[in-house]
Amino acid sequence: MAVHRPSTAQSGTVTTDVPARLDRLPWSRWHWMIVVGLGTVWILDGLEVTTVGNIAGRLSQEGSGLAVTSAQITGIAAALYVAGACSGALFFGWLTDRRGRKKLFMLTLAVYLGATAMTALSFAPWWFFLFRFLTGFGIGGEYAAINSAIDELIPSRYRGRVDLIINGSYWLGAVGGSLLSIVALNTRIFPVDVGWRLTFALGVVLGLVILLVRRHVPESPRWQFIHGRGDEADQLVDSVERRIEQEKQERLPRVRQRMTIHQRESIGFGVIARTVFTAYPKRAILGLALFVGQAFLYNAITFGFGSILTTFFDVGTGDTGYYFAVIAAGNFLGPLLLGHLFDTLGRRVMISSTYIVSGLLLFGTAWLFDRGSLDATTITACWCVVLFFASAGASSAYLTVSEIFPMETRAMAIAFFYALGTAAGGISGPLVFSDLTKSGVVGDTVLAFVIGASLMCAAGLVAAFLAVDAEQRSLEDIAAPLSAAPAASPTGGA
């Protein structure tokens, strides 16, 4: 049986060993439950975004049941989804730090499910646009609630690879969305006004399955002991330790690291902002650089993906889904195969190298494209290689901002940088790249590639100097909680 070290509370102060006990746990079925319950939401996000992009042409056809144009789907609906994601991240991120991880990751999934179901029932453009905004609102909230919960529940020696693979699973959804759209849009199988609705209905079904699993995911003990629930945190970790000892048939080692916390129910937004931008200015610059760099690289490639294939390589609009499925698979393989290196070689080496390598490869792709040396197959192969590295780098951006700031600010920091990156990619990116990739002029498309590659390389250089060596370190060691008593802060804290 695990050694129970009860927390002692005196005048709102608690001494706890919960973080050390969580970090020393071996990998178990309990951790797999966390990964499945929380991580699969990224598959839904990838499914959502890809599906809407692929059904834009079908929705604009006569008889679809929705009087919209393709431009409205890729323009207004996409912008509203992005705006909803940014708004949801900030709103739910603020609530997550105040009300807890579990309440919010259940609530945000419920918002997503309801909005997606209503989207499938769309009968007018305004209805479709409204629920695209609300779907994004739920998904944006998921990013803040889920990333913070995952990093606080996963042991430190596994945190990097697990976080990267989970964030990279977005592209499994993208593969599914691409292939699903090919079937759902086949009028020999489904009528014009039914197939696109079924794609949204499938998202609801998957979400309900995730909701059933997620019911068993606990609140973060780290959040509990800071917010006046030290006994609940101890009891939760005790139960997890007993389960793991029964599974492994061996006793867990004792821990010695303890810390003292001045408990508080809530922390003001002003305190959070001052902490992120005043106490940790270099880390804030790092987060901004990583998110902006990956957002522009992805828009340089993916925003005009279909237009580039159809304009320069005569690929039929009905066949672009196959090509997208291929590069989406490359995106997932990057975090899957490189993720463990972020825990072994380290954050600084891997973050900077994945950003710089992907940027340099995109420069090379731009040069080959300018020379006319590529066809539809070879440019897709080039994109696969670029995005193999870029996807690992982009996923590490989420990992970075979720682990380099104090616990009390974690969800809000994730929300802020996610909202900024999403806004850059979903608003500034299309404004910059839309005309470039659709003009039919080779030089314009090359310029789009060069902009994305330059920002990615610049972010990699920032990471080389400012990245935090967070591999296999406790979150409290990387950035001491704001509520920590100074004398009891972990050695090596921020």
Image (tube, rainbow, N blue to C red):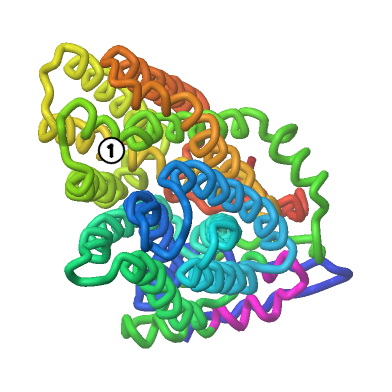
Residue 54 lies in the magenta stretch:
no
State the image coordinates of residue 455 (x, y, percent, origin top left): 44, 22
State the image coordinates of residue 254 (x, y, percent, origin top left): 50, 72
Q: Is residue 133 above or below residue 12?
A: above
Task: Residue at 82% x, 44% y: name it.
Answer: 270
Q: Is residue 491 visible?
A: no
State the image coordinates of residue 19 (x, y, percent, origin top left): 57, 63
Return the residue found at the far front: 62
Callout 1: SS: helix
Q: Is residue 273 above or below residue 64?
A: above
Quadrant in the picture for the C terminus:
top right
Left or right: 90 with respect to 43? Answer: right
Q: Nearer the viewer, residue 383 or 279?
A: 383
Task: Residue at 21% x, 44% y: name it.
Answer: 320
Task: Residue at 54% x, 57% y: name it.
Answer: 125
State the image coordinates of residue 273 (x, y, percent, origin top left): 75, 41
The part of the image, by quadrant, that contains residue 62 is: bottom left
The part of the image, by quadrant, that contains residue 176 is: bottom left
The part of the image, by quadrant, that contains residue 392 is: top left
Return the residue found at the far right: 11
**Range shown magenta:** 224-238
Q: Nearer the viewer, residue 20 or 230?
A: 230
Left or right: 456 with respect to 478? Answer: left
| Magenta segment, prevailing SS (helix, strand or loop) | helix
Q: Residues within 10 Å of mark 1 (few under 14, many from 20)?
A: many
Residue 225 lies in the magenta stretch:
yes
Left or right: 49 with respect to 487? Answer: left
In this figure, which residue is indicated by the disc labeled 1?
Answer: 306
Task: Residue at 26% x, 66% y: name it.
Answer: 184
Residue type (three-letter) at the residue carrying disc 1:
Gly
